[in-house]
Image (cartoon, rainbow, N blue to C red):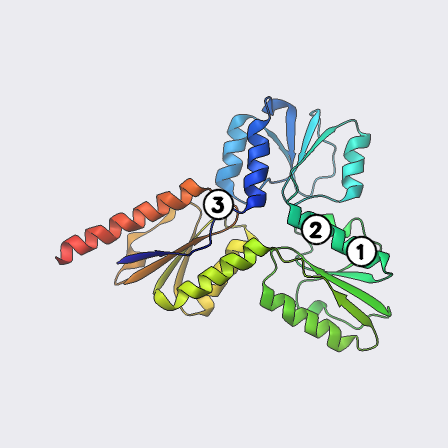
């Protein structure tokens, strides 16, 4: 049984940089993380053990600690100003690519366009994008596409949107709004694209796929869907303890990839488990 790793996988620079900022904070008990730093329960458990407080992602109460840390998913300028007005020191770890999505949305709005955000309305990143916009629209699927009266429309995407989903929805928006000048700014993050491209290159060579990362992670779900759509038996695990030997019965080649919030050590633990299983099976067949 071969173990083949995707050439691009695991933690992106935005998550890595956010964790580096958190590691440098000297007094965790004085800091509230404003939501989930990343959608990875292993990382969240580590932060909880260090003593950081955590406010709900959808929560509107001002944290009681003197320091509030904005996560890689970002928040609206409106929310940031609310925290500052409450006397909080704001430590901002917003991913630069999420910040670019905010700037793109504001640019489209400044051009007099009604802004459409392709993404999940309840996702923290999307909430941060729309809170600073006047009368925004959120489109999650084809059922949300309509004919809108505005003469100028602008489109941005949640940074972890599937490229094919975005292309389909943009085409549908244009088709149903022939009267409008529609402008799209590409805000899908490059690490997400790179991980998908690396997985697509791997899929023809494998008969099993393991995706490592948080079960709530949007980009992990994208990787899982790619494997399933290609017809490869695909398993999504957060940590090595979830792996089951029977998943790999008769497997010839197992592909390994991971989401952008997955710790390197978690990937290595899964890789080590798979490698030991492969060595054991080769030993039995010798």
Query: Is 51 situated above or below 235?
Result: above
**Neighbourhood count class around disc 2 (C-alpha, 10 Å): few under 14, some 14–19, many 20 upward:** some
Report the mark closest to the observer, 1 or 3: 1
Q: CA distance from mark 1 to mark 2?
A: 10 Å
Answer whether labels 1 and 2 touch (C-beta < 8 Å): no
The residue singled out by tag 3 in the image is 262
The residue singled out by tag 2 in the image is 100
Q: Is residue 230 left or right of residue 58?
A: left
N-term mark: 1 or 3: 1
How many numbered circles does the render carry? 3
Of 116 and 18, which appears nearest the observer?
A: 18
Instruction: Provide residue 169's location: percent of width, then percent of height.
Output: 67, 69
**Neighbourhood count class around disc 3 (C-alpha, 10 Å): few under 14, some 14–19, many 20 upward:** many
Instruction: Provide residue 14's location: percent of width, then percent of height.
Output: 59, 44
Residue 206 lies in quadrant:
bottom left
Q: Is residue 119 left or right of residue 20?
A: right
* Quadrant of the image containing the C terminus: bottom left
From where the camera sits, is residue 249 visible?
yes
As helix, strand or loop, the secondary structure at mark 1 comes to helix
* Quadrant of the image containing the N terminus: bottom left
* Residue that appears at 52% across and 49% down: 260
Of 268 and 142, which appears nearest the observer?
A: 268
């Amino acid at each position: 049984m071969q173990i083949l790793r995707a050439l691009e996988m695991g933690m992106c620079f935005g998550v890595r940089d956010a964790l580096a900022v958190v590691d440098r904070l000297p007094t965790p008990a004085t800091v509230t993380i404003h939501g989930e730093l990343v959608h990875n329960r292993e990382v969240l458990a580590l932060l909880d053990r260090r003593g950081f407080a955590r406010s709900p992602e959808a929560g509107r109460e001002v944290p009681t600690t003197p320091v509030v840390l904005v996560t890689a998913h970002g928040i609206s300028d409106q929310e940031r100003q609310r925290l500052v007005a409450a006397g909080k020191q704001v430590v901002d770890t917003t991913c630069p690519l999420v910040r670019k999505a905010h700037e793109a949305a504001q640019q489209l709005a400044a051009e007099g366009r009604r802004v459409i955000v392709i993404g999940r309305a309840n996702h923290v990143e999307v909430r941060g994008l729309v809170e600073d916009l006047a009368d925004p629209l959120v489109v999650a699927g084809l059922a949300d596409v309509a004919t809108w009266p505005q003469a100028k429309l602008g489109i941005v995407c949640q940074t972890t949107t599937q490229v094919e989903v975005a292309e389909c929805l943009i085409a549908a928006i244009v088709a149903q709004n022939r009267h409008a000048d529609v402008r799209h700014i590409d805000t899908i993050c490059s690490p997400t694209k790179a991980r998908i491209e690396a997985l697509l290159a791997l899929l023809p060579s494998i008969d099993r796929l393991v995706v490592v990362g948080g079960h709530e992670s949007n980009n992990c779900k994208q990787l899982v869907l790619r494997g399933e759509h290609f017809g490869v038996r695909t398993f999504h695990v957060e940590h090595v303890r979830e792996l089951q030997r029977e998943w790999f019965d008769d497997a010839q080649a197992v592909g390994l990839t991971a989401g952008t919030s997955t710790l390197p050590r978690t990937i290595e633990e899964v890789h080590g488990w798979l490698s030991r299983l492969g060595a054991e099976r080769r030993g039995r067949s010798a």
